[in-house]
């Protein structure tokens, strides 16, 4: 999915957690992923309705 988005010249932050499978089991990884989601939303949706 990240490659397809990048192919459309949209910036992508691709985060891989080597110690996880599908989903996040470790609390630290859930926090890091949530922070990345929030950065994305703040960057691309801030002030838009």
Image (cartoon, rainbow, N blue to C red):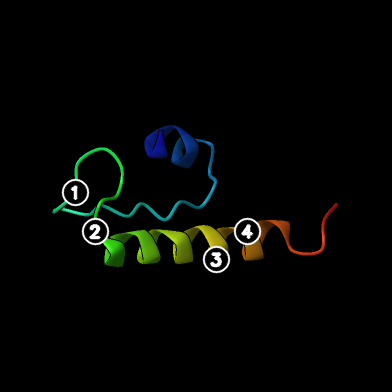
Whole-percent x, y for residue 34 in the image: 46, 60
Local secondary structure at mark 3: helix
Q: Residue at x 19, y 48 (%)?
A: 20
| Mark closer to the observer (4, 2) | 2
> Which residue corresponds to mark 2?
26
Local secondary structure at mark 2: loop
Q: Residue at x 63, y 64 (%)?
A: 43
Q: Residues within 10 Å of mark 4 (few under 14, many from 20)?
A: few
Whole-percent x, y for residue 24 in the image: 29, 49
The N terminus - image quarter: top left
Marks 4 and 1, Cα distance to the nearest angstrom? 24 Å
Q: Are marks 2 and 1 in contact (CB under 8 Å)?
A: yes
Label located before the other in sequence (4 or 1): 1
Marks 2 and 3, Cα distance to the nearest angstrom? 20 Å
Local secondary structure at mark 4: helix
Q: Residues within 10 Å of mark 2 (few under 14, many from 20)?
A: few
Marks 4 and 2, Cα distance to the nearest angstrom? 23 Å
The answer to whether residue 37 is left or right of residue 31 is: right
Marks 2 and 1, Cα distance to the nearest angstrom? 8 Å
11, 14: nearer the viewer: 14
> Which residue corresponds to mark 1?
20
Q: Are marks 2 and 3 in contact (CB under 8 Å)?
A: no
Label located before the other in sequence (2 or 3): 2
| Mark closer to the observer (2, 1) | 2
Label located before the other in sequence (2 or 1): 1
Q: Are marks 3 and 1 in contact (CB under 8 Å)?
A: no
Local secondary structure at mark 1: loop
Q: Residue at x 46, y 36 (%)?
A: 7
Marks 3 and 1, Cα distance to the nearest angstrom? 21 Å
Label for residue 41?
4
Label for residue 39?
3
Q: Are marks 3 and 4 in contact (CB under 8 Å)?
A: yes
């Amino acid at each position: 999915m990240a490659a397809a988005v990048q192919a459309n010249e949209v910036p992508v932050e691709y985060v891989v957690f080597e110690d996880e499978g599908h989903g996040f089991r470790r609390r630290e990884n859930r926090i890091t992923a949530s922070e990345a989601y929030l950065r994305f939303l703040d960057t691309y949706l801030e002030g838009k309705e």
